[in-house]
Image: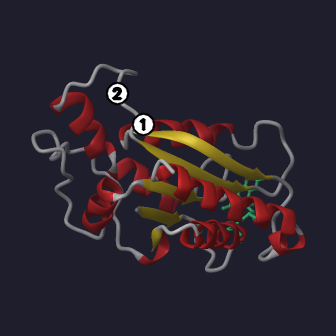
Amino acid sequence: MKILAIYGSPRRRGNTWLLLEKAFEGAREAGADVEEIVLRDLKMAPCLEIYGCKKTGRCVIQDDFQQVYDKLLACQGLMLASPIFFYAVTAQTKILMDRCQSLWAKKYWIEKVPFGQGEIKRKGLFISVGATHGKKLFDGALSSVHYFFDVLDMEVWRTLLYRGLDHEGEILQHPEYLQEAYQAGRELALSSTGR
Ligand SMILES: Cc1cc2nc3c(=O)[nH]c(=O)nc-3n(C[C@H](O)[C@H](O)[C@H](O)COP(=O)(O)O)c2cc1C
């Protein structure tokens, strides 16, 4: 079973990276074939809103998004990690989400799936951290993730959201968070195969 792990922070080994790494370690040890995508290493233009995807459901901008698109469609489960930047996901993550408007067009315009009635076929895990402690810290990102997963026919199966983490590697002071990430990865892999 194939699980895609998408890393959306611009920091090479950010707090979200360390969590994602644990999650895919858990998934791998549970037997999943986990592929990582580091968004900052890809050449991906923002959506141009030209709707070249309107007829086929495939984005017409030829860049690294094309391979991500195929992998998003092929995976059985998804892990997405992004820290909070200005109460939202990072720019790298948002560019990916916006390019998936092609999948929105495929689902709702081409296949004419009635809103809110699409079949949920896969599970998605969202991992995030932020520096502050505000109650609404993750609200914006969670809203985007909910609708992003929807175009992928995925449910927001689980979220791992941690406050009060700012400096690189600070998450290492919280082995319990890393353990939760490992466990979530493991459970995602096991439940994505129906075991
Ligand atoms: C451009 C930018 C915007 C940020 N905005 C927020 C914010 O709105 N709220 C918050 O709590 N932390 C914010 N932060 C802090 C990051 O969420 C925090 O440093 C986090 O640990 C980074 O995760 P990473 O190490 O995985 O990249 C921001 C950081 C940057 C660089």
Which of 15 and 118 lies nearest the eye of the viewer?
118
In the picture, measured across the screen, residue 130 lies left or right of residue 55, that is right
Q: Work out whether residue 46 or residue 148 is closer to the camera in this orientation and state it.
A: 148
Q: Which residue is mark 1?
A: 150
- Looking at the rendered image, the disc whose residue lies closer to the viewer, 2 or 1, is 2
Give the residue at the far right of this rendering.
Answer: 173
Q: Quadrant of the N terminus?
A: bottom left
Which quadrant would residue 171 be assigned to in this image?
bottom right
The mark that comes first in sequence, 2 or 1, is 2
Residues marked 2 and 1 touching at CB (< 8 Å): yes
- Camera sees residue 38: no
**Which residue carries the number 2 mark?**
118
What residue do we see at 30% from left, 58% from top? 74
Q: Residues within 10 Å of mark 2 (few under 14, many from 20)?
A: some
Mark 2 lies on a secondary structure that is loop
Characterize the local packing of mark 1: few (<14), some (14-19) or many (20 or more) Cα atoms within 10 angstroms.
many
In-front residue for pair 57/176: 176
Instruction: State the image coordinates of residue 31 (x, y, percent, origin top left).
Output: 51, 69
Q: Of residues 26 and 166, which is closer to you in this image?
A: 26
Q: Residue at x 66, y 59 (%)?
A: 83
Q: Quadrant of residue 96?
A: bottom left
